[in-house]
Structure formats: structure tokens, C-alpha cells
Amino acid sequence: MYLLRRHSQTHQENDSSQKDVKVSELRAALGPLSGRSLKFCTDACLRRYLEARNWNVDKAKKMLEETLKWRSTYKPEEIRWHEVAHEGETGKVSRADFHDRDGRTVLIMRPGMQNTTSGEDNVRHLVYLLENSILNLPENQEQMSWLIDFTGFSLNTSVTVKTARDIIYILQNHYPERLAVVFLYSPPRIFQAFWKAVKYFVDTKTSQKVKFVYPKIKDSIELMKTFFDIENLPSEFGGKATLKYDHEEFSRLMAQDDVKTAKFWGFDEKPNHIMDPIEESPAS
């Protein structure tokens, strides 16, 4: 028994050492970095891209370079809440005020509260909240959890398949290994048609993280309990807490986080309207 434990420990140490070598190889392959690219490409970041490409350095390099190119043009770290606040008025996507049992940030999505038709703005809003969720991850935690409530869901008001495809592409290619699990809570039958249309674009690794859960199925209830404290979990997901979205309060929280974001990325200038996003309207 001792020899088995010793062998397992040695194997883990060797595996860890080999992965450290891969990280060093990837960093060398990327060449000199500066500015935001250098800040973005931490060892943890490189590990995520290597993990997403099964520790193939060449494939991880290509993937990461595509992300750096995307970030240089899309500039997700420069998006400010007042630019996307109109998308969040109904609370269709918000960061929860609780974490899962592993301390991960939780994003709550309520597609039944879809309030706009611009695919581009919907994507931008979600990218903002992805960046915000990452900013608020506790130390030594790399991933987030998603909870999706289908109350009021309708194919007529849902985002288009194209928008869903764009979101999936960005998540898989530019935020690899950031998603721990997605709970689709009590999805209606009409969602199956939508899921069949978008599932084609979901890679195997991401697909395995998608969990369909139903309130009357015991296994589903137990699964939720393994990930969440029922006392903190909103009743919409089978918990005992109350889910309340106050747009004004959430906007204040996001404005405060915008200051943290600017500081993290080392911006010299203070983002416009950062302390009072409520006054900023889409029409202004």
C-alpha cells in the first residue's frame, strides 16, 4: 500500500514537472511580450491554454495568439458598465452575491428576461460580465459557475442562434478553462430545439460541463447540493434564498469594479462616468 501511494505521488510530481516545462516552452515560443499582453499571459493563463489544447505547445500557442489578437481589437478590459448597463436592466445576466462550494464566482442567467435585440450588444454585455467575474475570483481560483433559469423562456424572445454561436466561440476560444460547470435548470421542451441548433458549436470538453437539472428528479437535487449551499441558493434553482435583482444597486457595484479594473490594467485615465452609471442612458 505504501509503495502504491509512493508511486502515485512520484507520478504526480513528474506530471507537474512536465507541465511546468510545457509552460516554459510556451512562454519561449510566444517571444517577448509587453503591456497588457504581458500582464494577461501569466503562468496560470498559459496553463489554461495548454490544458485546452491537451498540452500541445504549438496548438496552445496558436490559440493564445488568436486571443491576444482578439483582445487587442475588442479590448474587453476597456468595456465599462455604463456602456452595457441598458442590456442588464432586467437582470438577464448578473453576478451572484454568493459563490459555489469551491469559492467560484457565479453568473446567473435568465434568458426569459431578454430585453434587447442587438446580438452585438448582448455579446458585449456578457464579455463585460466574464471579465468582471474573473476580476472577482478568489485567490487560487481560476473558474466560474453558471446558473441558467428558464422561467419565461420563449424562442421568440431568446437570443438568436447566431448570437449564441458567437458567445460559445468567444467563451471556448478566448476564455478557455474559465467555465467549471453550467446548470440548465428546468429547461422547457421548446429549449431542446434551440439546444440542438447550438450544440453543434460546443466542443466536447465544454459540453461535458453542461448539466440539465430538474427540480423533481432526485439526482438533479443532489447534484445541485454538491455544488451549492442550499441556504444561499435562490429558490429559482431549488434553494432557500430569494433572488432579487436591483439594477441601480448592481450598477453601483459594477461602477466600483470598473475602478478596480482600471487599476488592475494600469490605466492612466479614469473611465468616464464611472461613479454614476445610472445617469448614462443608451440614448445619450
Image (tube, rainbow, N blue to C red):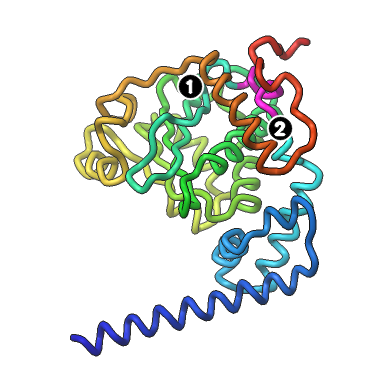
Position of the C terminus, as image quadrant, is top right
- Between 81 and 126, the one lying in front of the other is 81
Helix, strand or loop at disc 2? Answer: loop
Q: Position of residue 216 (x, y in %)?
A: 22, 33
- When asked about the image quadrant of residue 276, the answer is top right
Position of the N terminus, as image quadrant, is bottom left
What residue is rendered at 68% in x and 38% in y? 263
User: From where the camera sits, is residue 156 visible?
Assistant: no
- When asked about the image quadrant of residue 119, the answer is top right
| Label 2 Cα neighbours within 10 Å, binned few <14 / some 14-19 / many ≥20 | some
User: As shown in the figure, which amino acid type bears the numbered disc 1?
Assistant: Gly
What residue is rendered at 29% in x and 35% in y? 214
Q: Establish if 232 lies above or below 273.
A: below
Helix, strand or loop at disc 1? Answer: helix
Q: What stretch is highlighted in magenta?
A: 80-87
In the displayed structure image, the side of residue 4 where residue 186 appears, left or right: right
Mark linked to residue 112: 1
User: From where the camera sits, is residue 201 visible?
Assistant: yes
- When asked about the image quadrant of residue 148, the answer is top left
Q: Main secondary structure of the magenta part?
A: helix
Q: Position of residue 40 (x, y in %)?
A: 68, 53
Q: Establish if 141 lies above or below 281.
A: below
Q: Does the magenta stretch include residue 209?
A: no
In the displayed structure image, the side of residue 181 where residue 47 appears, left or right: right
| Label 1 Cα neighbours within 10 Å, binned few <14 / some 14-19 / many ≥20 | some
Q: Position of residue 68 (x, y in %)?
A: 75, 54
Contact (Cβ within 8 Å) of mark 2 with mark 1: no
In the displayed structure image, the side of residue 80 where residue 109 appears, left or right: left
Q: Nearer the viewer, mark 2 or mark 1?
A: 2
Q: Residue at label 2?
A: 79
